[in-house]
Amino acid sequence: MGSSADSERLFNRQRTLHEILGGGLDVILWRQKNLTLGILLVTLCAWVVFEKSGYTLLSLVSSVLLLLMSILFLWAKSAAILNRPAPPLPQLQLSEEMVNEMAASIRSRVNALLSVSQDISLGKDSRLFFKVAAYLLLIYFAGGLTDFLTLSYTSLVMVLTIPALYERCEDYVDKYIMMGYRKLLQLYVKLDEEYLNRFQNWVLEKKKLS
């Protein structure tokens, strides 16, 4: 791959998709075909069960937990009567260190989200505003076309198929996406100069007059 191809890569990245995702996510790139196919089949079966049986996620989880607790309870009682070993259960306990790490991670992500929301609300980043607005509109239209369960299944299928397809055709995909991105950027600059700047100047004039 030449230097011209490298410059056309998305986000000007220098590493391949496999290097970015890491070896632990080989299942997404179909490096472990049996595991990836198994995940898709299990997810498809779960989706069919939810759609055809009338179960909701909450009712199914509560039924499974009730069945599991009943089995373990009867196992423990019968083991005590028959002098057999109790069910081999791990120690179910969260360490203080684990809780602190989770809290710190959640805190940093929430603060980053609040910072972005503040920048958008104060009009500091117009490009970010349009990006967030586009994502929210996409979610809105997707939510209107399907239910949450189908959307979740479709999202998983996309996660397990699009990266693998992209890896095979990344040179062509990057080339045409970058061409489209440059055209959109030119359109944004044009709109920003013709409309947003005029609107900001109009607001400033109104403030001065008031």
Image: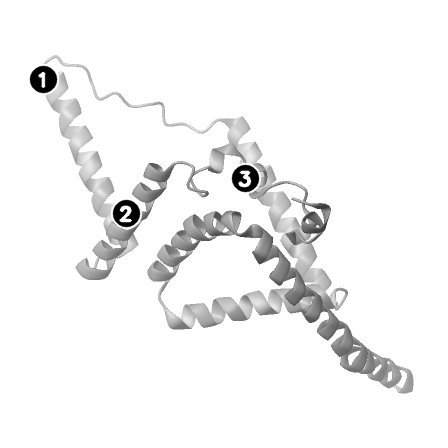
- Kindly check if marks 3 and 2 are in contact, taking CB atoms under 8 A apart as contact: no
Residue type at mark 1 is Ile
- Which residue is the site of mark 1? 81
Which residue is at the far right? Answer: 208
Q: Give the crowd class for mark 2: few <14, some 14-19, many >=20 residues within 10 Å.
A: few
Determine the image quadrant of residue 84.
top left
> Which amino acid, mark 3?
His
Identify the element where label 2 is drawn. helix
Q: Position of residue 66 (x, y in %)?
A: 20, 41
Relative depth, front residue between 131 and 199: 131
Residue assigned mark 2: 41
Q: Which badge, 1 or 2, comes first in the chain's sequence?
A: 2
Residue under label 3? 18
Say what amino acid the circle numbered 2 marks: Leu
How far apart marks 1 and 2 lie (CA) works out to 41 Å
Q: Answer whether labels 1 and 2 touch (C-beta < 8 Å).
A: no
Sequence-first tag of 3 and 1: 3
Q: CA distance from mark 3 to mark 1?
A: 55 Å
Q: Please report the residue visible at 38 percent of the width from the left and 61 percent of the height from the top.
A: 151
Left or right position of 2 against 100: right
Quarter occupied by residue 54: bottom left
Query: Marks 1 and 2: which is nearer the front?
Result: 2
